[in-house]
Image (cartoon, rainbow, N blue to C red):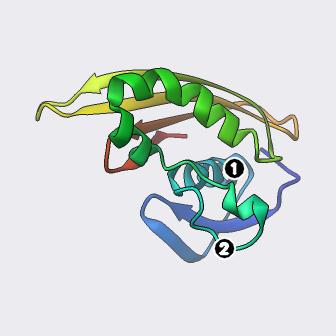
Amino acid sequence: MAAGFGADTFCDHTGLRPGRLVRGNLALAQALLRRATTPRGVLRGGEEESNYGLDVAGYVGSVGPQIAARALPSVLRTEWLKDDRVADVAIEGLVTQNPDGTSDVVLSCVVQPADESETFPLTLSVNDTTGTVLSS
């Protein structure tokens, strides 16, 4: 369990849950999801805030799932390494076909926290409208 990063308010793809706190790798996984789904430039503040975020769903929508599956692993890795709590991350992208004919990009990630705690898996499914955590 990541010990040195404190606690944060629970916040997954459904939104904030005030009064519920998370710590360790779950807090880090949720922070990485927020970084992946927040459009760059929407946070107010200084230079760090203006360079925060990626909007993976917008990326898939603008370039298509095939290109996104090839490009997002390096783009997302670069974004996540901006977080001081991440020592390294390995990401693989894959396109899956849905029964309705749409495609999703599945990003299978292995995150190495900077506090030298155990690596943990994080799997995201992204299409041109949403990004969700499949497992963490």
In front of the other: 84 or 46: 46
Q: What amino acid is found at the position of numbered circle 2 in the picture?
A: Arg
Q: Is residue 91 left or right of residue 67?
A: right
Which of label 2 and label 1 is nearer to you?
Answer: 2
Q: Badge 2, how many Cα within 10 Å: few under 14, some, many 20+?
A: few
Name the quadrant containing residue 44: bottom right
Q: Is residue 56 above or below residue 67?
A: below
Q: Residue at x 68, y 41 (%)?
A: 80
Numbered label attached to residue 28:
1
Can residue 90 be seen? yes
Q: Is residue 121 visible?
A: no
- Nearest the viewer among 108 and 43 is 43
Q: Count residues near mark 1 (Cα–Cα under 10 Å), then give few for <14, some for 14-19, many for 20+.
A: many
Residue drawn at x 60%, y 36% is 76
Q: Along the line of sight, which residue is nearer the eye, 20 or 104?
A: 104
In the rendered image, the quadrant that contains the N terminus is top right
Q: Identify the secondary structure beneath mark 1.
A: helix
On screen, 5 above or below 78? below
Residue position for label 2:
44
- Spatial CA distance of label 2 from label 1 is 22 Å
The secondary structure type at the circle numbered 2 is loop
